[in-house]
Image (spheres, grey):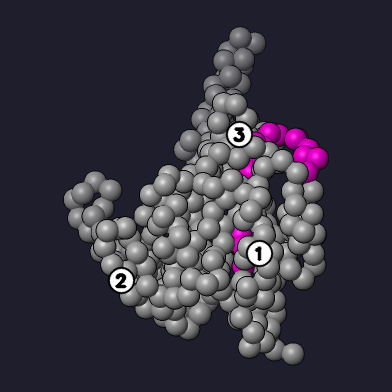
Amino acid sequence: MPSLRWVIVCCALSAAGCLFRSDRPAGTSTANALAPIQPTEGVYVESVILERPVGDPFLDRDLWKDTLPVGSPETLALFAENGLRVGVLAGSLPPRFQALLESETEALNGRGMTFAMRKDEVLPTSGPSERCEFAVLTVLSEKRTKVSFTQARCGILVRPEALPDGRVKVWCEPQIQHGERQDWLRPSADVTGLVRHSEIPLARYPMVAFETQLGRTECLVIGWQADQRDTLGEALFAVEANGQPRQRVLVIRARLSKPDSITDLPPLGVRRPSIAAEAGRPR
């Protein structure tokens, strides 16, 4: 009889276990649910916008004397034709540049992002603007094409990638979102039908996309040549505040990010809205 009772108890426990297992959602386990979330390795990207009046001697001229140019000769020519400037600051930062980074009024929209799960991100540089018009040159041998957007929001898409030597490769492309959200029909994943997608129209400029490698203390700077009016560079980096035109430079720094790592580098800029944004706020 004792052995029979043990058989009955074991059967009951087995049945209860089956019931508990069937109550759990498929593909889950208690061990996984209770395990602490582990930090993941990736790339940490910091960015900040420097903003001064248009034609500012430092942002428009002196800063670029200390940068290393980025891109092939053809890309550099397309930068110039489209009013763009791109360079890397290596070594000791110019004192004026460091002072702007630490400014509470001229270092704007400072942010930091970890790229572990995400692949890329758009860093806003200007907008939204009611109307945005300029001429763009896509091929050196051709003529400029005039474009016009409404409700334009301009930015630089960045896609960082860790390199074996500890540096970070950063790929950048200027982009402009514009207009209202629209519905599009696209093929489904299995190509058996069409799926409706809702997106905001996007203008991309791959002809002035570029990539560069950054060490942990190096800064990528992207800006506009102020005497190049009605260009893509002006659309990306010119704003207006209190009726006054202002000029911007985007600063990017990237480094490898490991769990529990601590950087000895000061953050880029302060986290506050731009002067242009504050000017539009109700008082």
Give me the residue at 74% from left, 57% from top. Answer: 97
Give me the residue at 79% from left, 48% from top. Answer: 266
Question: Nearest the camera: 202 or 231?
Answer: 231
- Gap between marks 3 and 2 measured at Cα: 38 Å
Indicate yes or no whether the magenta region holds residue 252: yes
- Is the residue 173 above or below the residue 51 in the image? above
- Label 1 sits on a secondary structure element that is helix
- Is the residue 151 above or below the residue 256 in the image? below
* Callout 2–callout 1 Cβ contact below 8 Å: no
Indicate yes or no whether the magenta region holds residue 155: no
Disc 1 packing (10 Å; few <14; some 14–19; many ≥20): many
Kindly report which numbered mark, 3 or 2, lies closer to the viewer in this rendering.
2
Q: Which residues are magenta?
A: 248-265
Which mark sits nearer the N-terminus, 3 or 2? 2
Which label was assigned to residue 167?
3
Which label was assigned to residue 175?
none
Q: Which residue, given by chain and number where applicable, does mark 2 sit on?
A: 145
- Gap between marks 1 and 3 measured at Cα: 27 Å
Kindly report which numbered mark, 2 or 1, lies closer to the viewer in this rendering.
1
Disc 3 packing (10 Å; few <14; some 14–19; many ≥20): some
Q: Which residue, given by chain and number where applicable, does mark 1 sit on?
A: 59
Q: Quadrant of residue 98?
A: bottom right
Q: Quadrant of the C terminus?
A: bottom right
Give me the residue at 78% from left, 38% from top. Answer: 262
- Is the residue 217 above or below the residue 94 in the image? above
- Label 3 sits on a secondary structure element that is loop
